[in-house]
Image (spheres, helix red, strand yellow):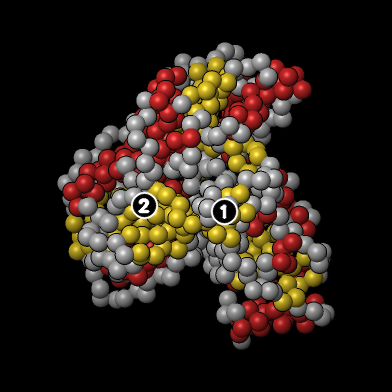
Amino acid sequence: MKILVAIKQVPDTATAVKVGSDSKQIDTTGITWIVSPYDEFAVEEALRIKEKRGQGEVVAVTVGPDRAKEALRSTLAMGCDRAIHVNDAALTGADTLTTARALAAVVKQEAPQLVLTGRQAIDDDMGAVGAQLAEVLGWPCASWIMEETVDADAKTVRVGRQVEGGLEIFELPLPAVLSAQKGLNEPRYPTLKGIMGAKKKEIKDLKAADLGLGALTPELSITTLEALPARPPGRIIQGETKDAVKELVRALREDAKAI
Amino acid sequence: MAGAFWCVVEDDRKGMPKKVMAEVLGEAARLGGPVEALWLTDKASEDGLKQLGGWGATKVWLLENAGLAPYRGEVWVPPVAELAAKESPKAILAPVTSRQREFMARLAAKLGVGLAADSVALARDGDKLVATRPVYAGKLLSKVTWAKAPYLATLRPNVFKPADAQAGKSAAVERPSLTIPPPQMKLVERREEVSTGLPELTEAEIVLSGGRGMKGPENYVILEELGGIIGAAVGASRAAVDAGWRPHRFQIGQTGRTISPKLYMGFGVSGAIQHLAGMRTSKVIVAVNKDAEAPIFKIADYGIVGDLFEVVPELTKEFKRLLEK
């Protein structure tokens, strides 16, 4: 069974981000980059499916600039067999639909039986690419999955989709697109052997033209990126617990009118 | 701008729209309307239709079919795309819920238009619409605009001003004839979560959150007791969830739920960036922590440097006293 995992390289959560000089993108100086955490759940799940079946291939794919190769290398160190890097200046600042179309073109070339991805990338938090990829391909899709089992014949997959108030268990015919929610698994750390082995694994570079992508005009564009306005300074309420609590409740009711 | 603002209805699966729809319909009206609801359901109720009218919908596009529940993207998208092609709405808005996030993304792909997910503000710019979205763990705000209509956006709950319910107002109900495709996905079962009896985290107006300072799973009962009195949901930080003290569905933060309540109260929560990402758009933030250096105090409106095991019972007592008055 061939599984494609779509990942994105994003700034580490703890890293400071500043608005760049064009006010549309971030200033990337000094940023620590990681594989988006939800995508790691997707990679882990793909590897577990392969291991359980005792055969198959897991291919990682990303759309991103040169630096994104490092993220692909991390997934190879975790155990992916090979990787595909869609790297084209024409895709800089691509919106989710453009990314989904590029990934769909890769899916058509690779013909996997399953595509896994994270529920959202933690940079722009749009959470749309997985579902849009399914739509472009005309495949069924389950988002925010918490559990997954592929049947023995690799014809269907049973998933638990997280919804408000519960979990919906669905059976989907393959091929399908699934997006991983936290709780699906605990991603492994690459071993030293994995890291060394990753250097020898293939990363194929693709340009937009290799994928037959036509004009790449985004449907959604960033007009400005700005820092979050600072919250007004807060107030530390001093005093004995009892008095402090009384004052807090009074302030919440009378000043803030929050309760 | 020609065309209407469609508001996709999120319902309680029992024929009633959820109250977050008052926010979506209210925002559509504020942006100039016309305000129309789009409801895909297996069974709508008369009260539900009245409710949508009361919240300002002048028309309800009702797609009522057994195949529409539970939500499946492959079944929902084709009829809505067909209707949109016929009616040319100028915008399609939905609240952020797990299914609406997927549905709106698929619909945007089908229509070949942009989607602004998890928006916290919308503004008219002439004929255009501009959405504001928190990005990079909520550290930055991104303003986005669409190349063409319909403008698709999902709206973060508790951020937009809800429409006032007006009795006597009603919406015209249209039942368009559309093709509902058969589903490929089969529902096997639905596992309900054990109800805490408290509001749902993303919908609650007040959220209490317990972090590592809670010391163990057994202590959340003091937050639940306080929550029961003031009608608050109880959430947790990643540290507490990763320690196995609370199920993941209660996690607030980057790899959990994003909330925006009127009042957030953190107890023993340090305020790591990934937690702030999920709650920093809360209107009023209260922090209770023994450590005066905890980063959460930097964004808190009110803070008490102290032991939560003393503060929480006092809060419970104080609110009880006020309620009895």
**Residue hosting label 2:** B146
Q: At 71% across and 63% down in the image, what residue appears? A: B296
Q: Which mark is residue B261?
A: none
x%, y% of residue A240? 83, 79
Which residue is most to the bottom? B325
Asked which secondary structure carries label 2, the reply is: strand
Q: Are marks 1 and 2 in contact (CB under 8 Å)?
A: no
Write down the quadrant of residue B183 in the picture. Answer: top left
Q: Nearer the viewer, residue B203 or A237?
A: A237
Q: Amino acid at mark 1?
A: Ser
- The crowding category of the residue bearing disc 1, from other C-alpha atoms within 10 Å (few below 14, some 14 to 19, many at least 20), is few
- The subunit letter for the residue under badge 2 reads B
C-alpha separation, residue under disc 1 versus residue under disc 2: 23 Å
- Evaluate whether label 1 is on the same chain as label 2: no
Is B12 rendered above or below residue B255? below
Q: With A61 as the anchor, is A109 left or right in this view?
A: left
| Label 2 crowd (10 A; few <14 / some 14-19 / many >=20) | many
Residue located beneath label 1 in the image: A21
| Residue B127 can be seen in this image | yes
The residue nearer to you, when weighing B126 against A53, is B126
User: From what the image shows, is residue A109 above or below residue A27?
Assistant: above
In this rendering, does residue B258 appear at all?
Answer: no
Identify the secondary structure beneath mark 1. loop
The mark lying in front, picked from 1 and 2, is: 1
Residue at x 59%, y 37% (from the top left corner): A9
Image quarter for residue B14? bottom left
Q: Which residue is at the front of the view, A37 or B59?
A: A37
Relative image position of residue B117 (x, y in whole percent): 45, 51
- Where is residue A51 shown, x and y percent of the image? 61, 18
- Quadrant in the picture for the C terminus of chain A: bottom right
